[in-house]
Image (cartoon, rainbow, N blue to C red):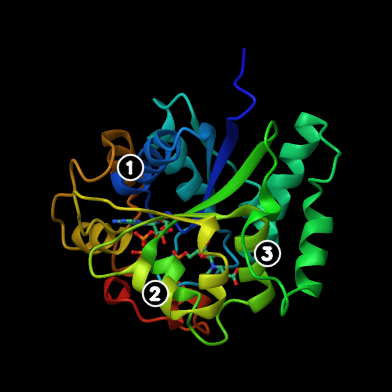
Amino acid sequence: MEDPNITKVVLLACGSFNPITNMHLRMFELARDYLEDTGKYRVVKGIISPVGDAYKKKGLIEACHRLEMARLATDSSDWITVDSWETLQSNWVETARVARHYYEELMATEQNNDDGDVVKCAKKRRKEENRFKGSSHQKRTGSTRLMLLCGADVLESFGVPNLWKQEDIIEIMGCYGLVCITRSGGDPHKFIHQSDTLWNYRKNIHVVQEWVTNEISATHMRRALRRGLSVRYLLPDAVLHYIHEHNLYNDESEQRNADVVLAPLQRFTRSSSSS
Ligand SMILES: Nc1ncnc2c1ncn2[C@@H]1O[C@H](COP(=O)(O)OP(=O)(O)OP(=O)(O)O)[C@@H](O)[C@H]1O
Ligand SMILES: O=C(O)c1ccc[n+]([C@@H]2O[C@H](COP(=O)([O-])O)[C@@H](O)[C@H]2O)c1
């Protein structure tokens, strides 16, 4: 018998996953431990949603390969899944829209048509943008909630001018909530404190401290692979075999989209993003 006071949660992680690393998988485990330790949540599913080919980020290889690597990486997990919906869209899809898609899917599955309609919630949120002061609109005890899972760099990218739409940030915080894993060099608590918008929604942002800090990033993987260095044990063996089998990361692949106007997050110069 389910405890009615415990809210079920689906975690959604968006990103390039170019390639997927062990840290991407660890994010899910860390988030689940954190949420369940509060005694308020039970994490029932994790979704990895790789960005589509229309996201013109330098060095981004084809979605079919990124998807397949993510599938191989999650093969042994009984709760983390990979979903191709985002990669099947012809245009780049904003993260708020991706979240809306999965939330609607979730609601349809649960046939839960009560006041949890996220589209209504999103519209209302946009109207109330300047008045709303955070927190308890999301409470839907008894039904499943969707939360966005990301690293602290993504949270901090919310502060980059003209990168995210303000209403999307508000929708993400107000309708879903965020689980944010610390990354070395970042300070999400300070960032939330310094942003009026994030401060308003602070109760919907769960900052998870990763004590075993590491610098694993997809950028590091690609760089090492281009140089013929080992990345073994930084990503699953099956993924590594797949990379070698298809010769995925090399000087040529790193030049993909090099001549295209930068993808949104690339404009936000993170140290790990330089090649
Ligand atoms: N070492 C890490 N610690 C915490 N979060 C991470 C880490 N690596 C990736 N993430 C998070 O995983 C999600 C997907 O990330 P993404 O595919 O952009 O990986 P990345 O390793 O940061 O990529 P790149 O190096 O290509 O920019 C993002 O929310 C990102 O913040
Ligand atoms: O929705 C937005 O406005 C938005 C702005 C910048 C980035 N994102 C998403 O954030 C993710 C960033 O991935 P990456 O690999 O560029 O760090 C990817 O899923 C993008 O679609 C989303």
Foreground of the two, 235 or 151: 151
| Quarter of the figure that contains the N terminus | top right
Furthest toward the top, the residue is 1
Quarter of the image holding residue 34? top left
Asked if ligand 1 lies within 8 A of label 1, the reply is: yes
Q: Mark 1 or mark 2: which comes first in sequence?
A: 1
Whether the residue under disc 2 has CB within 8 Å of ligand 1: no
Q: In what element is the residue under mark 3?
A: helix
Q: Which residue is denoted by mark 2 in the rendering?
A: 191
Mark 3 lies within 8 Å of ligand 2 (Cβ measured): no
At x 39% / y 35%, what residue is drawn? 37
Residue 122 is marked as none
- The disc label shown at residue 171, or none: 3
Relative depth, front residue between 242 and 72: 72
Whole-percent x, y for residue 267 in the image: 45, 83
At label 2, counting other C-alpha atoms closer than 10 Å, the crowd grade (few under 14, some 14-19, many 20 or more) is some
Q: Nearer the viewer, mark 1 or mark 2?
A: 2
Q: Amino acid at mark 2?
A: Phe
Image check: 45 left or right of 141?
A: left
Q: Residue at x 29, y 44 (%)?
A: 22
Q: Tag 3 or tag 2, which sits nearer the N-term? A: 3
In this picture, is 16 found above or below 68?
Answer: below
Q: Label 3 amino acid? A: Glu
Q: Which element type, helix, strand or loop, lies under badge 1? A: helix
- Which residue, as the protein is rendered here, is positioned at the far bottom? 161
Residue picked out by circle 1: 26
